[in-house]
Every structure is written in structure tokens, then in C-alpha cells.
Image (tube, rainbow, N blue to C red):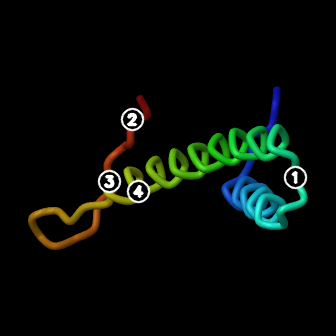
């Protein structure tokens, strides 16, 4: 079973891609490939943040003001 990439690892990869692209040392072809890879990393990070936000929003208060956790169903 493949291990899922952590948010931190994906963000680090995205930061590395940005540094390489900002260096100006890439050919146009390589810059486009890095851009495509960066967009994939960006989407992965945003998806993880979205899932995390949904999980956090599932923590709600009941009528007595007590925090309760409702199960989060991933789609």
C-alpha cells in the first residue's frame, strides 16, 4: 500500500518548485513541466486543507454548549 504524502512534504515540494522557477535557470520546456508539477502540488495541498477544514467544522456545540463531534463522511 502506498503511503500518502503529508501536507508538509507536498508544501516543501511546492516551495522547491517555486525556487527553481524563480531562479531563471530553467528552459521554457522545463519551466512548463515545473509549473504543471507545481499546480498538482498546489491542488493536493488545497484538497488536504479543504478536508481538514471539513473535519474541524464537524466539531459543534450541542444545545447545552458542550462540544460534540459528529462523524465526517468523506465523499
Residue topped by disc 3: 58
How busy is the neighbourhood of tag 1: few (under 14 within 10 Å), some, or many (20 plus)? Answer: some
Vertical position of residue 2 compared to residue 58: above or below = above
Depth check, front residue: 17 or 3: 17
Q: Secondary structure at mark 3?
A: loop
Sequence-wise first label, 3 or 4 = 4
Residue most toward the bottom? 65
Q: Nearer the viewer, mark 3 or mark 4?
A: 4
Between disc 1 and disc 3, the foreground one is 1
* SS under mark 2: loop
**Which element type, helix, strand or loop, lies under badge 4?**
helix
Distance Cα–Cα, label 2 vs label 1: 43 Å
Residue in view at x 87 percent, y 46 percent: 27
- The reply to whether the C-beta atoms of the residues labelled 4 and 1 are less than 8 Å apart is no
Instruction: Tell me, yes or no, whether the two marked residues, 1 and 3, touch with CB atoms within 8 Å.
Output: no
Pointer 1 residue = 26
C-alpha separation, residue under disc 4 versus residue under disc 2? 13 Å
Give the residue displayed 70% in from the left and 59% down from the top: 11
Whichever of labels 1 and 3 marks the residue nearer the N terminus, that label is 1
Residue 4 location (% of width, % of height): 74, 40
Query: Distance between the Cα atoms at labels 4 and 1?
Result: 36 Å
Identified at 72% across, 53% down, the residue is 10
Q: CA distance from mark 3 to mark 4?
A: 9 Å
Q: CA distance from mark 1 to mark 3?
A: 44 Å
Residue annotated with mark 2: 73
Amino acid at each position: 500500500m502506498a503511503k500518502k504524502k503529508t501536507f508538509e512534504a507536498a508544501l516543501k515540494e511546492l516551495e522547491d518548485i517555486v525556487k527553481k522557477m524563480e531562479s531563471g535557470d530553467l528552459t521554457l520546456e522545463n519551466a512548463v513541466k515545473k509549473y504543471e508539477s507545481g499546480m498538482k502540488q498546489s491542488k493536493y495541498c488545497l484538497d488536504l486543507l479543504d478536508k481538514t477544514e471539513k473535519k474541524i467544522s464537524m466539531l459543534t456545540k450541542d444545545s447545552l454548549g458542550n462540544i460534540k463531534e459528529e462523524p465526517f463522511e468523506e465523499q
